[in-house]
Each structure stands twice: as structure tokens, then as C-alpha cells.
Image (spheres, rainbow, N blue to C red):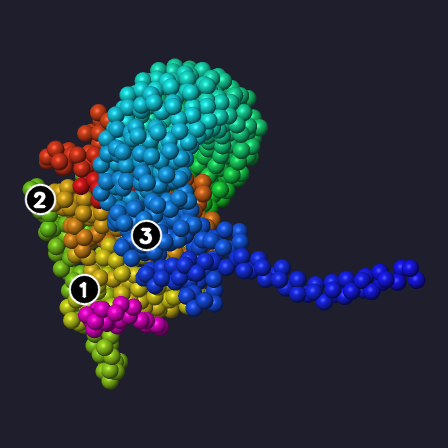
Amino acid sequence: MGNSPYRPRKMSFSLLIWVFFPVLLLLLLFFPATLSALPPDQTSSMATLSQQIPSPPPSWNTTGEIEPCKWRGVTCNPHNSAITGLSLSGLSLSSMDNLSTICKIDSLEVIDLSDNELTSIPSQFISSCGQLAGIRRLNFSYNNLTGTMPVFSSFLQLEYLDMSYNHLNGGIGSELDGLVKLRSLNLSFNSFSGPLPITLWKSTALQELVLSMNHFNGSIPQEISEYQSLALIDLGHNHLSGPVPSSIGQLQELEVLVLSGNDLSGSIPDSLLNLTKLSKFSANQNHFSGKIPPVLTRSLTSLDLSYNNLGGPIPADLLALPNLFYLDLSYNQLEGSIPGGVPSSMIRLRLGSNLLDGEIPAFAFQGLCKLIYLELDNNSLSGFIPVGLGKCQSLALLNLANNKLSGSLPSDLADLSSLQVLKLQFNSLSGEMPTIIGTLTRLSQLNMSWNNLTGSIPSSISSLGKLTTLNLQHNSLSGRIPDSIANLGSLIELQLGSNRLGGLIPTMPLQLQVALNLSYNLFQGPIPSTLSDLNNLEVLDLSNNNFNGSIPDHMTRMAALTRLVLTNNQLSGVIPKFGTEVKVEIDGNVNLIWPPTASVNSRKKRNDIALAVIISLAVVVFISMLAILLIFSASRRFYRVDSEQVPSEEGISPPQVVQGAILTTNRLHRSNIDFNKAMEAVADSSKIILKTRFSTYYDATMPSGMRYYVKKLNWSDKLFQLGSQGTFVREVEGLGKLNNSNVMAPLAYVLTEDSAYLFYEYPQMGTLSNAFHSSSSELDWASRYSIAVGVAQGLAFLHDCSSGPILLLDLSSKSILLKSLKEPQVGDIELCKVIDPSKSTGSLSTVAGSVGYIPPEYAYTMRITMAGNVYSFGVVLLELLTGKAAVSEGTELAKWVLVKSSQQDKWDHVLDHSISRTSPAVRSQMVAALKIALTCVSPSPEARPKMKSVLRMLLNAR
């Protein structure tokens, strides 16, 4: 009873909990939501901003159903109570005049306006947003900003500033004064000039300094050592000169140092040994001399000192660094032997083009399971190829060319199942070609030329289904060429000259394109008619054999042939009439005579010509009589048939149109394109203008008189998507919507039972390759520069398509068409879309690119990339600058230029003299364009700029 007064109170408390707990729970749930709401002014600002942007992202809903914190590109704080980041990247913005609302969001910390079309930053933006105390990141990269550097001194809290990939120029003075908290500055890929910006040194917090791909000059200042927080310095590809200051060794936090592509000289400073955190050091393409420091930091993972004048031996400790995976010391003057003990972490080792001698240490490469690229070419290495190389299971490229190696190939090379490129030319290797070579089924390039190999070519070589280049010339090989060589369906170049081969010439792989060289052998008898089937072949060399009889008439139909070498044989008869683009060499064949149209002096030749004329007339009369009978027969058969189709000159019926459509909206083309007339043209071989591995171009004249290019794509070669016409049509329809004056977009398409045809505007000047050969004198610098800019515009457009990048399978001077000498068009844009990867991935070297234009990494990656397209464009640009072909006398133009340009005093030997000497202004522009080309053909894909940047640099070069 004494406790009874407390019971009601206890009951009341319990009741209170049960009654108010749900209410309390609702309040607790509601309270965070209340705190999470954006302030009305920020919601209003975002609604206004959405209206100011021409094409806002779809998720930017201004009806209030979706909160701004959930919009794409909008970042809020953890409680969604304030907007902290705003990304307007990739919205095709061309002006900031209507974007002042951004600066009204006072909680902003990050503003990203990258990848747009902005040409300037309004002063109002600088003054308004500069008052926002929280701004830490500004990104204006990948725009079209011009003029000098904007003044950002009012952004006192700014930590990251990215102005890369623009057109900014001039020097940098006090524009960045006051940015005492700046941690990262990226001004790469612009046109800034003058000395390195000293005013940056006021920011002691600076950690990343990226100034590459500009025109900065002068020396690297000693004061750089005052910025002890620097972890990354990239000064690559400028005009910096003088030595590297020893004070750089005081930057204890430095991890990455890039000095590539400058005019720096002197020695590599020993003070780098103090940088215990340095992991990457690139100083290639400079003028450094002296020796490599004996010891470098043990944290080093990547070292590139190629294309310098370094001498002395390779430090033994250098290859003992435990984490080193990339070492490039090529193109120097290093002496002595290769140190042993290559670290197991090594992926790429390039020591080529030096003065190294001695034997390749066998033990140095044992157990290197990660090694992919080994290049020791162009040295004086002797002895045998070490047996231990067979244990490098990941090896994709082995280049030991141009040394003094002897002996036979070790048997354990058969264990290199990943090997794709094997270069052993210009050595003293002997013995027979081992049959084990056929086990290297991933091999795409095999070069064993200029050795002392004997015996026959093993038939097992036909197992190399991915082989694109086979070079065995200048050996002592004998016997017959294996009949199974026709199975090499990917082969595009076959060099067997200067051996002792004989017997019957077998059927050759139909994909041969670059060259077939059988010169200086023991072949005899008539020229095989099967050689006429090589419709993709450009060079055929049968010289210095014992061929007799006449030159087969069918050889005149080899559409891609540009050079036919028949010198020093026993051929006779009248030379067939080849096209003007074919250079025929016949010296040393005393019984060969030119056709009647050629001028002849000797009486014997006149008699032979007269006899040939009489025979020809008789043949013509016979053919005429036969034609009259055929026409009479045909007229009786089809007398009552109403048909618009006219038989072709060869009597081949035009292909039947299964499906076709006009893609262009241009009324002129829509009213002029006639499918039936076009099919008549493709049935006539005389209408062929150009033939490549993938397609044949025809000249089709419509009833109205307008001419078009009609391109035939064969389904039968199994590269194209059989049974996937629907996919093909969708892809082509998408390409037909492209609108760029420098891109050759299809106007229409036609499908037949076994082929596809695409229609294009007729380019009056043909291909860029033809323009070089037929009218190079007309290609002055103004024309060449316009062509370079136009191709860059077209390629940048394709890489930046809104539906996704369009990559080119084969960019070369033959796939660039000219409407005029200053109006190029990038062609073959559909190939990467319509080729079936499942049927071509395994042998993409037969597909991807022409020799001389193929990026070096393609041999290992087998992938088409934007960086690879940039490399191909770089080769085209080098053609325009040098006047040389992409491959000349067996040397690729890109490699030749890289070697020559390693010393700037030789640049005049690189440029086309007939153009560069026109005026100092022209030479200056060509030198600027040459620097751009060199970055494009950089051996490293990561070092190549994007096409959008290449275009900007080209525009700035004028």
C-alpha cells in the first residue's frame, strides 16, 4: 500500500512514451529532411541557369520534381543543403555571357567548364566568382580560349587550375599572383611563350606543375628548388635550353619529372640521386651528353633518356633497380656491354641504336615473365642469341637487328607463344630456318633478311596465319617456295630476293599489297599468270632471273600496281600497255619491244612494230566479225524486251540492286543519283579509279552528266558482316548524317547479292598520294598547310562525334581525297564500322592501316585507337613537310625523321628544301608543324596529343 502512490505516475510515463514516440519518430525523420533542403536562392539560381544553357542535360528538371542535387554534374554537401560543385563539361557552350548565375551560388567550391567551345572568359566572371571564398577548383581545359592568360589573382583559395588544351598565348607575368594556396597548375597544350612563369614560385603549396606543349624558352630557373612540395613537374616539348639546375635535387617530394622534347644540354645532374621518391624521369629528345649517373633512386619505375648524346657505359646498378619496368636508352652513344641482372619487373627494355658490344648476357633475361618488348637493335652485339630468351613467356617483340650475332636460332624460341614481331635482319646468323618457326602462331612480322641462312623455306611457315610481313631476302636459301604459302591469308609483304630459290612459283597470297620481291633468284620459264590475280599488289620485282616468253597481258589489270621490275631476264615480245601510274623497268631484256605508240629508232624495232600492227589488225577484224554475230544473236533474243540496262564493254551484266537508298538531303544529289547507271559503271573495269585492300572506286557518270565516286565493298572477303545487312544499313545511315566539309560522308548506298556500294562526291584532284606523284610542284606550302589543317579538322570531328568516336582503320595519303589542292576529305570512314571484329581481330594487321602509317604499339595491342589515328596523321603531316613517302627504301618515314630531328641543326635536312627555302616565314611555320608531327608520332601512345589539340596547334603554327 505504501508503494501505491508511485504506480499511477509510472503508468502515466509509460503511456506518455507510447503516445508521443511515433510523433517524436516523425519529427526525427522530418528534421534531417528539413536540414537537407537547398536554400531557395540556390534552387532559383539553378532553375535560371538551366534556362541560360542552350542544351542542358536531360536530368536538369526545373519543374521541382527532381532536386538540383540529383542533377547530372551537380555536387552537394553530405546533407544536400548546399551546392559545392558544378560541372558543365561537354555541353558545347560557346559563350559565358549568360552564365553569371554561377557566381550567385556562394557555396561553390568546384567549377568545371571543360570540353566546350568557349573562346574567352568574361571579366565579369572573374570579378564575381573571384569573390566566392570557397572556390578551390577551376577547369577550363579543352576549349577554344584565345588571347593571353586571364588574371586569377582574386581567387585566394584556389588550389587547382586547369587551362590545358586551349589557344592561349603570350607570356605569363603577374596573372597568377596571390594564388598562395595553388597546389596544381596545368597550362599544357597552349602557345604560351617567354620564360617559365617565375611568379608561380610564390605558391609554396604547389604540388603539380604541368607546362608541356607550349613555346616557353630560356632555362629552368634555380628558384624551382624553393617549392619543396612539388611532386610532379612536366616541362616537356617546349624550347627550354641550358642545363638542368642541380638545385632540382632538393625537391624531396618529387615523383615525376618530364623534360622531354626540349633543347636542354649538359649532363644529367648527379643531384637526382637525392630524389628518393622519384618514380618517373623522362628527358628524351634533348641534347644531354656525358654519362648516365652511376646510381639512381631505387624507387625509379620509368626512365626515358632516348634521343640524346649520352655516352659511356650503362651503369650496372641501373638495371638492378627492383621496381624498374620501363627503360629507354635508345639513340645515344652508349658503349660497353649490357649489364646482367635485369629486374623481374621489366616490361619494356630499349637499348637500340647505340655503340654497345659484347655478348647478350644469357642469364640477364632468365625468369623475366613480364618482359614484353626487348629492343637491342643497331649495336655491335656479337655471339649467339641467348637461350634464356625462350623463358620470357610474355615477349611480344624481339628486335636484335643490325648487330653481329652469329650461329643458329635457339630452339627455345619456339616457347615464345606471345611473340608477334621478330626482327633479326643484318646479322650473321647461319644454318637452316628451323621448322619450329611455325609454332609462333601469333607472329605478325618476321624479318631474317641479310643473314647467311641456308636450306629451304620450311613449309611450316604456312602455319603463321597472322603474318603480315615476311622478309628473307639476301640469304642463301634454296629450293622451291612452299606451295602452302598461299595459306598466309594475312600476308601483305613478301621479300625473297637475293637467294637461290627456283622451280615453279606457287600461287601467292591474294592479300599481298606492299611488295612481292623475287629478284636475284633462279626462277625460269614464263611469268606465271597467277601473279595477275594480285590485285592489291603495289610493287612486283621479278628482276635478275631467267624468265622468258612474253609479259602476260593480264598484268595490266593489276589495279594497285605502281612499279613492275623485270630487268635482266630473257623476256620477249611486245610490252602490254600499262597505266601511266605504273613504272615498268625492262632493261636487260633485248627482245622486249614497246607497243606501237612508243618512239623507236632501230629498223629492227620498226619491223617488229609493223608486224605487231598487222597481227593486231587481224585480231581486230576477227573480234569485230565475232561481235557482229553476237550482237545479231542478242538482238533477236531481246528484241521485245524493254530494258534500260546496257551491257558493259566486257559483256558483264550490271549487278542487280537488292536494296538502296539515298542518304543525303541535298536536292542536287537526290535528283542526280541513278542506281542503275551506277551499276553499269561498276560492271565496267575501265571505270576503276582506285583499288585498295577493302574496296574498289569507280567513276560513275549519271545521265545528267554529274560524276560520282562509287565504292564497292566485297562481302566475299569475310571481313564484312555476312548476314548483317541491317546493321550495315544502320551504320551507313548514321555516317550519312555527318556534316563536315573535311569528311567524305556517303551520299547513298546500294546492296546487291554479294556486295555493297557507297556513293560519294567526286573529288576532282584524286588522292593526296596522287597529288604528290603527279603534281607535287603545285603543292606549295600554302596548299600543304591547308591540307594538313583540313585533315586535322576532319579527324578531330570524327573523334569527337556525339554518338561516340569514329576511328579510322586506314588513314594514309591514299585515303585522303582532294576536292582541290586545298580542300581535303578524309575517306574510308565506314571501314571500322562495317568490318566484323569477330572475323578480323585475329588478323587485324591485314586490316588496320598501310605500312608506314601503322602505330608501333599496334603490333602488340591489335587495337584501333584514337592515339593510333593520331600517329597515322603524324605520318601524313611528315609527308607534307618532307615530300617523302611513308616508306622509302625500306625505311619508315616516322623513324627516319625521329632520328634526324634529334639534333635541331639537322632539321633543314628533314624539311622539303624546295618549300622550306621559299622564305623565312615559311620555314618557321614548317618547323612549328614539324614539332607537332613529332609529338604525333611519339613511340608512346600516352605522349601523343588528341586530335582536337593537334588541330589547335596547327592553327597556331601559322
Q: Residues within 10 Å of mark 3 (few under 14, many from 20)?
A: many
Which residue is the site of mark 1?
A: 707
**Image location of residue 719, percent across then percent down:** 41, 56
Look at mark 2 in the image and give the residue it sits on: 600
In the displayed structure, does residue 919 sit left or right of residue 369? left
Q: Which of disc 1 and disc 3 is earlier in sequence? A: 3
Residue at the image point whose x is 35% and y is 69% from the top: 752
Most foreground residue, 496 or 828 = 828
Q: Which residue sits at x=37%, y=33%? A: 180
- Is residue 707 visible from the viewing direction of this image? yes
Foreground mark, 3 or 1? Answer: 3
* Mark 1–mark 2 CB contact (< 8 Å): no
Q: Quarter of the image containing the N terminus? A: bottom right
Q: Secondary structure at mark 3?
A: loop
Whether 673 is among the magenta residues is yes
Q: What is the distance, in whole Å, between disc 2 and disc 3 at their CAs?
A: 67 Å
318 vs 492, nearest the viewer: 318
| SS at mark 1 in the image | strand
| Position of 284 relative to 506 (above/below) | above
- Label located before the other in sequence (1 or 2): 2
Give the amino acid at mark 1: Arg
Whichever of callouts 2 and 3 sits on the residue coming sooner in the sequence is 3
Q: How many marks?
A: 3
Give the magenta range: 655-676
Q: Amino acid at mark 3?
A: Asn
Q: Which residue is mark 3?
A: 116
Q: Is 392 a magenta residue?
A: no
Find the distance from the CA under tag 1 to the CA under tag 2. Answer: 38 Å
Q: Nearer the viewer, residue 715 or 461?
A: 715
Q: Is residue 141 above or below residue 656?
A: above
SS category of the residue bearing label 2 = loop
Question: How far from the left and from the top, in percent, is residue 459?
Answer: 48, 41
